[in-house]
Image (cartoon, coloured by chain):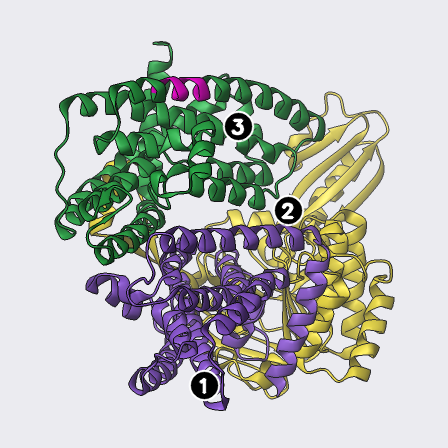
Chain colours: A yellow, B green, C purple
Amino acid sequence: MEQDSVIHIDQLSKIYTVNEREAGLVAAMRSLVKRKTRAVQAVDSISFSVNEGEIVGFLGPNGAGKTTTLKMLSGLLHPTGGSATVLGFRPWERNRDYLRRMTLVMGQRNQLLWDIPVIDTFELNRAVYRIPEPQFRLAVDELTDLLDLEPLLQKPTRNLSLGERMKCEIAAALLHRPSVLFLDEPTIGLDVTMQRRIRQFITDYNMRTGATVLLTSHYMADVEALCKRVIVIHHGKLLYDGELRGLADRFAPFKTVEVELRNGVRGLPLAQYGELMAHSEGRVTLRIPKAETASVTGRLLAELDVSDLTVQDPPIEDVIEHVFNQSPDPLDHPDRQRPPSE
Amino acid sequence: MFAYYPIYKGYFRTALMVQFQYRIAMLIWLLGGIIEPLMYLVVWRTVSEQQGGSVGGYETNDFVVYFIAMMMVSHATFTWIMWEYVYRIRMGLFSVMLLKPIHPIHSDIADNIGYKFLTLTVMGPLTLLLAWFFEATWQPLPWTLAAFVPVLILAFLMRFYWEWSLAMVAFWTTRIDAMNQAYIVVGLFFSGKLAPLSLFPEIVQRAADILPFRWMLAFPVELLLGRITPRELLIGIGAQLFWLFAGYLFMQFIYRAGIKRYAAFGA
Amino acid sequence: MFYFRLFATYVRVGILGELEYRANFWINMIQSALDLSVALGGLAVVFSHTDTLGGWRPEELLALIGVYFLIGGLIRTIIRPSMTQFMDQVRQGTLDFTLTKPADSQVLVSIQRIEIWRLVDVLIALPVLATALVRLGTRLGLVETAVFAVTLLCGGLIVYSFWLMLSTCAFWFVKVENIQVIFMSMWQAGRWPVSIYPAWLRSVLTFLVPVAFATTVPASAVSGRITTSTLLGTIALAAALLLVSRWFWRVGIRFYSGASA
């Protein structure tokens, strides 16, 4: 199991030292003489492994340490502690052979050159990655096909829409056919159709090449569509590592019950069944602790004039929100879950 | 007039604070303004020494004083607004300025004066240091000193209005590097920065009389050196007032046209 | 070889990118012409009052101006745009992309942006140099040509290394674009032979900001006034600065990735 893991990190930590700046002229003068600094633990001894071909969602609120972790894995940052190997390399040694086999896509940053046609940025990457011409042609054709780049390649980057640019960014990052992909918010700011498009592409690429993908996203739709497994970190600490479905069980031990009532909801003491989440004429949504699901639905059916009743897992957004609102104390979860081997 | 006082006070305070944040950049930007006159000082001092101590009515010491004074006057009157506006319009910062119920030139003036005020702490000692190093001697005439103050203020204002107006060209095109450059180069030849104007051929001197540049720089400098007669002083102030007024009219005109253009095309 | 091809690709892409802005050619042409007119105008005024300046004849100063524009053109074409872009990348975090590339980061950064139209400075420099040489009446033999080429190359390398070191400071201080202004401010002093400056300024222009090596030294090679020790010193300095800047770049990268923290 451990041997064929592509990414393996163990007790990885990163502490930043940041300057503190106060407002005002006097403080500014004081900072001339002495800078106040503060240590920030961005990543706090996290460990996990990712197997070949897996797509893993890396979740956490802003500042949780996701990007820092991705940067350490892509060789941009040295960790303060712990170890990591990707494809058998220690990333921060920045071995050329490693760099040729991985890629980093950052949704909020561009690597395409602003003023020149997209295809010329591709050419630059071809030169930098020393991709042989035939293989390069093949890669461009394939990516053009998968991402519908045909009309975009000859345009300068600045003339592309945000979504078009992102498609080209991703293509530029994959020309050398990396087998490990680090995607940091690849769909940020894109419209729903484009998000779906990119998602589909990631799935396709993963299927075709068997590449391993570690992805962060704020859009739960991305995570739900792409990742069977998620890793959740908060304040630099690992909170959860396991199946996406299991996340709800673990952190949101409740279900959503939707009830349709024949005679309307007016005057009914609905709050006694569970937390009232939404109600309209004839429809009620309740949140019920998981353990009580059976008994509460029984009572609902028995005591009210129910025409329809559905029990669902809560939406993943709610679960995540719930997770991050909880006090983050990973000591409560010392047994980090491993992905169940299927 | 006095209505502006609290506004300027506010601008001034923030300008000082902002510029203090950029103190290193501030010092670095001074460098160009120091090196250039220093370079010509050295060149002309060398020429003068080679020619037996005097060239075109300037003695070696006169050249030293001339270029040190030029450095100060040039520093006191220079603006960076022509580059600033390109940046503002490119970055879309100008819209914010337009939302304020006050003409944007005021914050620019306050900014400029704030900068000058802070940099005086460097330029003052530097002037003394250079004067000491190049063994400059200078006996100011009281009346020229008295006249120098309004002349310098007029020079500052006329330069500010003209350069601010030229900066407005950024509303039409943000690629105005060549224009800025042309302005600077023409200025170099006719303002007396390169060499005292009397060392230039007659035709350049006559052109300099007609153009505004001399009245921005060479005139205050020569006044400090005591090379201006009272009659020339009056003519000079007249020329300054004329160019200031012309600059003001030009500014009004181009600013209105620019705003119209800006409103039509956005940023 | 790989890096040579890489450079060629960057040049090609640079040309393509700049073709987008054809007007830039004319703008740069105007700017360079204006710059040249200041330099020549300055010379004209000076030499209307004297025959030599600090022992340099007009033709020799003309050669100096040619060298000044030649090296200045290279700075403006490659060094400054690439280094400016590098600083932007540090600030915006896009340097990360460069660092994840399987090639030497210093090379990638140093050639990443080529503003091809700035080469007009070089184009302008050539006739100026040619005129100076004709007026000087020096017949450039093989040795003189080689010495000139070597000093020119060393001058370029010295300027590059110096600039790289300044830019590398961006790893520690984010707002350092202005550092480039230091160089460009000092650079203009290179239009005149450094020998005319007072000793302290001469030392600054020679050792603190090595303008002298990029302008006065090659120009004196053309006019045959260079000494062997100056030549050897220039070569040694170029080699040393290249190594030091390389080392400093490595330190910067290590700092950036938190290895030294």
From the top left corner, tell me how far across and down residue C33 is, in percent.
56, 53
Chain for numbered disc 2:
A
Chain for numbered disc 3:
B
Q: From the viewer's perspective, is residue B169 above or below residue C195? A: above
From the top left corner, tell me how far across and down residue A180 is, in percent.
65, 76
What residue is disc 2 on?
A318
Judged from this view, the residue extending furthest toward the top is: B2
Secondary element type, mark 1: helix
Secondary element type, mark 3: helix
From the top left corner, tell me how far across and down residue A203 is, in percent.
78, 67
Left/right of residue C130 with respect to residue B47 in the rendered view:
right
- How far apart marks 3 and 1 lie (CA) works out to 52 Å
Which stretch appears magenta?
A: B237-244
Residue at position x 49%, y 38% from top? Answer: B84
Q: How busy is the neighbourhood of tag 2: few (under 14 within 10 Å), some, or many (20 plus)?
A: few
Image quadrant occupied by the N terminus of chain B: top left
Question: Disc number at residue B165?
Answer: 3
Viewer-nearest residue: A196 or C89: C89
Secondary element type, mark 2: helix
Going by the numbered disc 2, the residue's amino acid type is Asp
